[in-house]
Image (cartoon, rainbow, N blue to C red):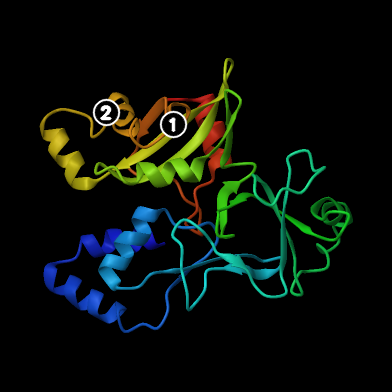
Amino acid sequence: MYARLIQGYEAMDPELKTASATAARHLRLMMSGSSALPLPVMQQWETITGHRLLERYGMTEFVMAISNPIRGKRKGGTVGKPFPGVQAKILSEDETSNDQTGVGELCIKSPSLFKEYWKLPEVTKQSFTDDGYFKTGDTVTVDEDGYYIILGRTNADIMKVGGYKLSALEIEAVLLEHQAISECCVLGLPDKDYGEVVCAIVVPEAEVKRRRDEELKPALTLQELSDWAKEKLAPYKIPTHLFLWESLPRNAMGKVNKKELKRKLADDPK
């Protein structure tokens, strides 16, 4: 949503830009839910509006559970700490241990937690731990200050590449720093040697695309992206496949269905 608003702002004439930015500064609070915004988007929004977005985390099953503070340190790239009365734990991949400093599935116990899925007893049973925590399906870690970092949906955003577990959201946040990239989607494609390989689908920045089209060149090449990313990403996180698209396919909520994209690219990689 905020990335789209920034695109709309950039397309405005100068007078309307000034009026819009001034109006935004009169708003009391701006929030962003779910996983944390990519840092470049957050920083750009703050430059335009003067607002440092309040980032938080919740689901329909328990409403809000984790948040950066209204007053206090709002850390970019995180969704903050659990609310008072909310208990959070990180479940290891084999579900045999709790690791509050490593990487695993976020589990929540809260006064606002729902009781069950309507007429779906088996789904309900699979969604809770034996001690009553709800399994969110999100992979997380915690930083040195106890702020939670959402690495992505376990079944869509976590890639297993040559023995490494990688967060697509982390790589996307870095790629968005590239001047030629307006939007991007990172996902893992099946590979017989590595299990999965890192694939980036990129929507080029309009002005860069126009200029490169005049030179009869693609807006961005895989080699250019790799050379640039060497200074910012570990070698195993650098995309080895690159697709340049006019836009990213989104659902009615504006979200990219990565599982569907993976199936499409695996069946027809063109």
Image location (x, y in percent) of residue 77: 46, 56
| Residue linked to disc 1 | 234
The part of the image, by quadrant, that contains residue 231 is top left
Instruction: Give the residue at x 23% y 30%.
Output: 218
- Which sits in the foreground, 251 or 50? 50
Looking at the rendered structure, which numbered label has been put on residue 266? none
Labelled disc at residue 224: 2
The residue most toward the top is 193
Residue type indicated by callout 1: Ala
Q: Is residue 72 left or right of residue 259?
A: left
Instruction: Name which residue type carries label 2.
Output: Glu
- Give the class, few, some or many, for how many residues have Cα within 10 Å of label 1's Cα (few <14, many ≥20): few
Q: Look at the picture and state if 24 lies above or below 268.
A: below
Quarter of the rendering containing residue 76 = bottom left
Question: In the picture provided, is 157 more to the left or to the right than 90?
Answer: left
Question: Does residue 32 lie above or below 166 as drawn?
Answer: below
Is residue 63 among what the camera can see?
yes
Decide which of tag 2 and tag 1 comes sooner along the chain. 2
User: Does dot 1 land on a helix, a strand or a loop?
Assistant: loop
Identify which residue is drawn at 78% across, 38% down. Answer: 94
Name the spot of residue 10 as percent of width and height, x first.
Answer: 22, 60
Image quarter where the N terminus lies is bottom left
What's the CA distance linking mark 2 and mark 1? 16 Å
Quadrant position of the C terminus in the picture: top left
Say which of 120 and 140 sits in front: 140
Mark 2 and mark 1 residues within 8 Å of each other at the beta carbon = no
In front of the other: label 2 or label 1? 1
Q: Image quarter for residue 18?
A: bottom left
Residue pictured at 57% horizontal, 48% vertical: 152
> Which residue is drawn at the image coordinates 54% and 46% (left, top)?
257
Looking at the picture, how far across and down is residue 204, in whole percent?
28, 41
